[in-house]
Image: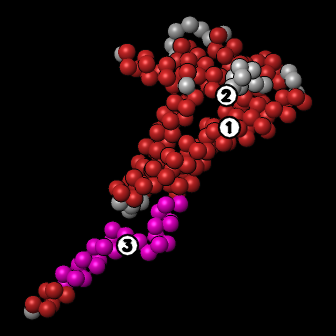
Amino acid sequence: MRKATQLWEMYRDNAAMQDIMETAVGAVVSAGGQALLTDMSAEEIALSTALGAGGAIAMRPVLGRIGYAVGRPIDKRMPGLNDSIAQDDFMASMSIGSPAHLKYVERLPEGGMKDTIRGISQAKYNQNFIAPGGRERGYAEGMLGTFGRQYGDNLAQGAVALATPLLLDSMGRETYDDQKVRQLKAELAQLEGQG
């Protein structure tokens, strides 16, 4: 139990750890998809997974920064946006990690998943709504940064996972079926030579 608590605290308090853990989940999903849906070898899947994870780790902070940069002027033009979101329970419930979501979670009844939801929302708030200098970001800046971080890795991993089989095929890679046909033809030729 102590290890699980330590792991959770690392996730909650460390943005880089969130990136690594969430990218690892995406890597498992893309590798599983390739194992089930392609004829790629284990080595090819491992290479594709490593490339996808590397791209994902690089894309998360880049797209996060782009999201923050796009959101900052929106917050300047719409300064009360977070308060407006907080007044709408549906919007607040969908804005995980925002100050509005943290207020929404406090209004939930005790028990059930409240502590888990609060913890996840606090982790996302720490990562995306607190700027490096300690300033609280506005709603648009924080949410667009969140979207950039959350989906930037998915884009990178998905692109690599989808492109790798196509790239390998275009390079003239012999599929498993092609290897079997070649092997059977060689065996047939050998048998015909003996007869």
- Tell me where residue 102 sits by quadrant: top right
**Image vertical order of residue 126 relative to residue 144, above or below:** above
* Residue at the image point whose x is 43% and y is 19% from the top: 6
Which residue reaches farthest right? 77
Q: Residues within 10 Å of mark 2 (few under 14, many from 20)?
A: many
Mark 3 or mark 1, which is nearer to you?
1
Q: Is residue 80 left or right of residue 150?
A: right
Q: Is residue 147 left or right of residue 169?
A: right
* Residue at the image point whose x is 37% and y is 15% from the top: 2
* Residue at the image point whose x is 55% and y is 32% from the top: 16
Res. 120 in view: no
- Tell me where residue 123 sits by quadrant: top right
Q: Residue flagged by tag 2: what amino acid is it?
A: Asn
Q: Are marks 3 and 1 in contact (CB under 8 Å)?
A: no
119 magenta-colored: no
**Image vertical order of residue 70 relative to residue 5, above or below:** below
First in sequence: mark 3 or mark 2? 2
Q: Position of residue 105 (x, y in %)?
A: 64, 14
174 magenta-colored: yes
* Residue at the image point whose x is 55% and y is 35% from the top: 19
Q: Which residue is mark 2?
A: 128
Q: Position of residue 155 (x, y in %)?
A: 60, 48
Q: Which residues are magenta?
A: 163-188
Q: Position of residue 92 (x, y in %)?
A: 71, 22
Q: Position of residue 29 (x, y in %)?
A: 46, 44
Q: Which residue is mark 3?
A: 174
Res 64 label: 1
First in sequence: mark 3 or mark 1? 1
Q: Are marks 3 and 2 in contact (CB under 8 Å)?
A: no
Q: Are marks 1 and 2 in contact (CB under 8 Å)?
A: yes
Instruction: Quarter of the image for the N terminus: give it.
Output: top left
